[in-house]
Image: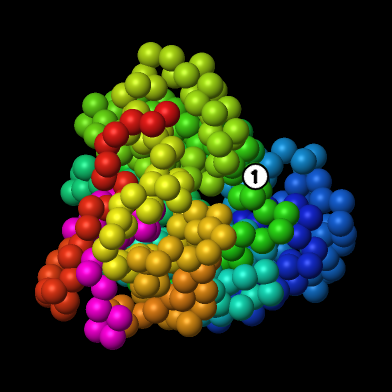
Amino acid sequence: MPAISIIIPVYNTKIYLKKCLDSVINQTFKDIEIICIDDGSTDGSLDILQSYAKQDKRFVILKQEHKGAGEARNNGMNIAKGKYIQFLDSDDWFELNMVENMYNNAEKYSTDILVCSSRKVDDSGNIIEKDNPNSPINLALTPINKVFCAREYKQNIFTLFTPILWNKLYLKDFLHSNNIKFSKLKIYEDVPFVHSSVICADKIFVLNKEFINYRYNRAGSLANLRPSKTIEVVKSCIELKQFLEQKNLFTEFEDAYNLALKNHIQSEISFCNSEQYKSFLISLKELIPNDWQKIQSAIRYDYITLDYLYKIVGNKRVMLWGASLFIKQILEKEEKPFKNILGIIDKNSGSWGKMCGNYKIYSPEALNELKPDSVILTVLSNNESIYKNLKEELKSKYPEIELMNNIFENNKMVI
């Protein structure tokens, strides 16, 4: 019986697949089985899988009609023999010591779920983001190197880390005993799975180590369909609610659920254009006709405009804090820079010196040189703790600089 079953759904990722598989077979930890599920690929991915299986007996190859990654992972879980289950997407790759570190810590602390961090890479594999304090782990809230459970973080349990699969090592018996499986949704299927597992786990342990390379926003990725599929994230949250109700946990974690629902919606509509947003609103009111008004603060669209940003900036000389994809898509609409925006501060060292729209990205230390009047938080965070922490940091290091209202704090409704 292998110690770990690594489950990899594969769909038309031929150009990335060898790097992914090489990162698995060359792990320093060898006691693994590698379950690859071809989800109806048409690009030759299956041929690559079969060639690897001929050379390495640890491979198990499954085939299915194209039904999505969730169905593929369920099929992999059904035959997994390992004590632990680790997921990996076929366009990403592990650091070679990743599995060894995860396994040793899982055994040491007897975890149900063990979490590590990741870095973002571009389509060519170049690092574009590392040491992000907010994603995939919210370092302001999440206990590091300490065992904890959901009941210790009832208000914020769904915001401690991003609901992604591949940075978590799961105890197989834990998943089976709680009947945690993947949704049939084709997108956002990981949201109810991760949130449900986190709620049920008695022992969670987090390592702030970047063991995984996540190929972000690549061509052909399902993530690129998000703007036209935003309503699906609401469906995923409804499935989470149903799971909590079945476990008689919804009342206990209702506040955390409502916060997660709002955060997911706010995040996803930020990628929509105005027509996609209008379509989302229509679908939302049809999907939850009795409840949609409860989340009105999350479905306002006015903050996704240049006019809204300019109105906040006003006549003050400001720096924006956070060169996120959210603010980038707003700034890309500019024909010329706004005179009162001096630039953008970001803690991602890989972005320093680059441009975000019309503005240069600086390290936080640049505040001493540029001396803005104010700073505006422009990170679409999954928790307002980032705003509180930034306020404390500015007050301590740059007492002369004002932290203006968070760009998302205006509760005026424009929908």
Location of residue 73 in the rendering, given as x and y in whole percent from the top left corner: 62, 47
For image coordinates 39% across by 22% down, the residue present is: 292
Q: Secondary structure at mark 1?
A: helix
Label 1 crowd bin: few (<14), some (14–19), many (20+), radius 10 Å: few
Q: Which residue is mark 1?
A: 225
388 inside magenta stretch: yes
Location of residue 413 in the rendering, given as x and y in whole percent from the top left corner: 33, 31
Q: Is residue 303 among what the camera can see?
A: yes
Relative to residue 93, is residue 375 drawn left or right? left
Look at label 1 and name its amino acid: Leu
Span highlighted in magenta in the image: 368-389
Q: Residue furthest top?
A: 290
For image coordinates 27% across by 36% down, the residue present is: 411
Q: Is residue 375 among what the camera can see?
A: no
Relative to residue 54, is residue 201 drawn left or right? left
For image coordinates 82% across by 60% down, the residue present is: 45
Q: Is residue 324 above or below residue 151?
A: below
Q: Nearer the viewer, residue 108 or 195?
A: 195
Q: Is residue 195 above or below residue 353?
A: above
* Coloration mode: rainbow
Relative to residue 107, is residue 333 drawn left or right? right
Relative to residue 78, is residue 197 drawn left or right? left
